Structures are given as structure tokens and as C-alpha cells.
Image (cartoon, helix red, strand yellow):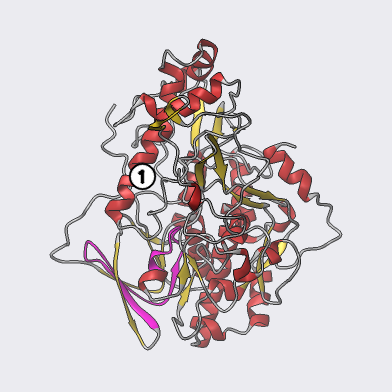
Amino acid sequence: MSFENLYYYKQVEKSSNPETVQKDLIIYGATPAGITAGVQAKRLGLSVAIAEFGRKIGGMSASGLGATDLGAEAAVGGLSNEFYREIGQYYGKDMQVTFEPKVAKYVFEKWVKENNIDVYFNQYLDSVKTEGGKITEITMEDGTVYKGNIFIDSSYEGDLLSKAGVSYFVGRESNATYKETYNGIQFGSPHHKFEKWIDPYLVEGNKDSGYLPGITETDMELLGYNGQGDKRIQAYNFRICLTQEENNRVPFPKPPNYHPNRYILLLRYIKAGFWDAMNLHTKIPNGKTDLNNHGAISTDNIGMNYEWPEGSYETREKIFQDHVTYDLGMLYFLSNDSRVPKAIQEEVSKWGLPKDEFEDTCNWPHQLYIREGRRMISDYVMTDNNCLGHTSVEDSIGLASYHMDSHNCRRVVIDGRCVNEGDVEIAISPYPISYRAIRPRAEECTNLLIPVCLSSSHIAYGSIRMEPIFMILGQSAGVAAALALKNKSSVQDIDYQTLKQELLKAGQVVDWDDSIEDDPIARMEETFGK
């Protein structure tokens, strides 16, 4: 099997006759947020172009994340709700929040076609030109130039906001930064931890032999304390679509640069009596599943992504390939390595990659799950105080309702044993997201909106960073763009009451009705168990 077409970035030559694209609204990133922004803007009469870094549209929703992190269903309005209803129609139901990747791709492509939105692929952002605090044009590595009145950065990394000179943060703020409770370093989570003492050394019991792959830090002086800020980010993985259907199953291939000893830590954990690496294996239609990380050692490539948010495209390509090797290699190891208990080998070997998904990338998802990249710092920063209901906002553009969810950020050694650090899972009720959190400070840029890498602390972002919410925020950004263009104003000077009325017309839910029956703890336990 050839993996040549499975990549994040391949350098392109600059065209000798580059195209110039001029529209009312230029969107960078065909993620779900970018698509809903474009659809809404078109419905309001704007001309729109989307410049997409990769070769596909739909971001994570069309790349394996078929078990939607929905939160409270009643909090999801507008195009986000419409998306899940269209998915439902495909399956002959009113609404469906679990789906095959190809079906999400189908709906997004349908929307783009119906709304005559121009999408340009393989658009690697090179430079941003600004004048008088406004973006005037953005240029890609191939020379394509995009000129617009309003710009939206809907990328997972925040590359456009960075090149436009907008303030941002990468990593975990200290609790003291915004007077939070669950930010910064977090030891002691009851979830996704080692349930037994696991030796981290190459030769068990011999510290001088070195450490096994998968250990990210060994210096106890660098452990830090709960609530301390740092530059670490939560782990990435692929959301892997699997099947047991014989006529649609491809056995796990050996990935490039595979090395079985990368999984010795997992093997030791299994032999200690803990086989849970594939427990978060959610059913989606037609005999398929969405495999996500679960337990102490699973699909999360912990600590191997720190350079992604601000890394060059070449650096990201190396990280992307390492994650392909790690995740696919784990499945290959579990189903083929003779050291794995026979019962587990047989169990994993029953699974494989679906032939009818990701057909041009070896049936493997094309999008790495970027759980957090840059996060803008604007006039208002969403924090866990918003999530916990300790504070609220008067300029809501949509609701978030998924629990605060940070995956582990590192795997360390403490007194000779493996310990994971960074996991947070805290139940919350629906809460409003501020319009100020998706637009920069006026002194930094007046015609840019940022619905994905919005102004939020690390732990609040752990609640906001879900695809249904990104679609909500993308649509709201599309409305705001239309109002700014109509009134010839900056994105900061939009009248909120006017914005709110337009959002309500578009079906957005901006206030939570406390009379709606909702059990946040039950919702969280449904995902993670009690």
C-alpha cells in the first residue's frame, strides 16, 4: 500500500501567472466553521471565496469525527442544527449526530454547491498585507492573491490571525491569569490515567537503561504544580473510522517508519491487566465506528505536538506523519505482534479500515485532530468562569454546552512510575459565548473574525472546541461580516442588538432556557462513564 497521497503539506511552486480572487468575504479554512460562515454570508447576499489549506472540505466532521461531541441538543441552533438534520435525512431520520465521514463530506459539498461558494484547495498561506488596521489581501505560496472587505480565519491553527498581527496565546495559562480553577498543569484526574504501577525503563527496574518511547518528561524538577501555566497543549490523534464488515474491511497495513518497540509501554499495561486502549469505540451507521482515545495509553500521541501551532508547514508535516505512524502503528502492533496476548490480537484483527472511506488516502483520515492551536487574546477572554456559570456575557452569539474537556498534555515519570498529566473532565450547563471573543481588539485589526481560534483560555477552549459549536460560531461570524459590510463599519462597531436579531432570524440559539430538562453530569458520564 502506498502512502504517498497521505500528507499534510507538499511544497508548491509559485505560479508564473497567479490568480487574484476578489470577493466581499474571504474565508481561510474550509472547516465546518468556514463552511457555515460562507453559507450564511451567501444567504445574506455577500460574494464569498474559501481558501482551504488541504485538499478536502469539512475539517474533522468529514475526517472521522462521526460520533459528535454535541452537548445539550437544545443549545444547537441555526446551520449547525440544520447540518445534523440533513445528515438525518440521508439516513431516513429527522436528525442524526453519528454519521460516516463520507456522509458529512456529502452534506458539506452539497451546501457549497447549492450556495455557489468558490473553494480553492492546497492554499498555503504565505503573507498577509494590512493597511490602516485592515487586511487588504492575503497571498498563498503558489502566488494566488485573495482580496476582500472582510476576512474570516476559520483554520484550526489560527495562521491568518497570527500573520495579521493579532495577539494570541499558545499553551495553558496559569489559574492566576484569569482567576480560574481548572487551567494550567493538572495532576490527579480520575480518568485516562495509569490504573497500576507501570515501569518506564527500557529494562524494567533499571533507570540507567533509559526510558521507553512514550515518556515525554523525566526531570522531576520540571513537574510543576497544579494550576501552573506552561506552553504545553493537549494531545492530538486521528479519529479513526473502523469496520468489521468483511466485504468492506482492509486489514491494518504497516505504516512507514513503523517500529514495534514504540508500543512496549502499552504492552506492559496490557500485561498488567488493563486492555482498554480501544474502549472509546463509538458505533456509527453501516457497521462502522469512530475510534477515539481512551485510558492511559491509546491513540493520543501525548507530548508529540507542542511545535504544531507555531511550526512551519515542514515541521507540521513531520508531526503529521509521526501521528499517522503512531496511530496506525498501534493498530498494526495490536493485531500482528506475537508479544500481544492472542485474544487481543484476534479481537483487534477483526477490525480494519473501511474500503469506502478516504479512498484516495489509503482509507485513512486526511485531517489530524488539532484539539487546540493558537487562541486569540481579545477584549474579552472566555474562561472556566463562563463554563461554570460564575460569570456571563450580554453579547451572546451562540451557546456552548459540552463539558470542559482537556486530553492529557504529557506523560511523566514520578518516583519510577508512569503518570499522565493534563486530563480535565468537568460537567457544565449551557452558557453563552461573547461576540467580543471572535473579533480582535480594534487597534489590531478591524475586518477580521475568528470563530475557531477564538479568545479563550485553554480550559474554556476545552469546552468550546467542538464541531457543532464551531459551526454555530462560523454562522454567527458570517452574519457579523454581512452587517459590517452593509454598514461600512469595523467588526468591532457592529451594534449587538442588530446582530442578535439577525442571529435569531437565522435560527441561532443565543440564550439558554433554564426550564429545558438537562443533566450535565449525565451527559458527561454518557461519554466517559461514571
In the image, 50 versus 139, the foreground residue is 139
Is residue 128 positioned above or below 183 on the image? below
Residue at 59%, 70% in the rendered image: 177
Is residue 271 positioned above or below 355 on the image? above
| Magenta-colored span | 134-160
In the image, 114 versus 524, the foreground residue is 524
Decide if residue 297 is in sight here. yes
Image-based side of 478 in relation to 48, left or right: right
Q: Position of residue 479 (x, y in %)?
A: 56, 72
Q: Position of residue 27 (x, y in %)?
A: 42, 66
Image-based side of 13 in relation to 515, left or right: left
Q: Report if residue 171 lies within the magenta region.
A: no
Image-based side of 141 in relation to 430, left or right: left
Q: Quadrant of the C terminus?
A: top right
Q: Quadrant of the N terminus?
A: top left
For residue 471, what is the image quadrant?
bottom right
In the image, 460 versus 217, the foreground residue is 217
Residue at 48%, 55% in the rendered image: 232
Q: Badge 1 is on which residue?
A: 320
Q: How many marks?
A: 1
For residue 447, what is the image quadrant?
bottom left
Image-based side of 6 in relation to 44, left or right: left
Is residue 1 positioned above or below 167 on the image? above
Q: Residues within 10 Å of mark 1 (few under 14, many from 20)?
A: many
Q: Position of residue 386 (x, y in %)?
A: 69, 66
Q: Position of residue 312 (x, y in %)?
A: 30, 58
Q: Secondary structure at mark 1?
A: helix
Decide if residue 382 is in sight here. no
Is residue 297 positioned above or below 111 on the image? above
Q: Amino acid at mark 1?
A: Phe
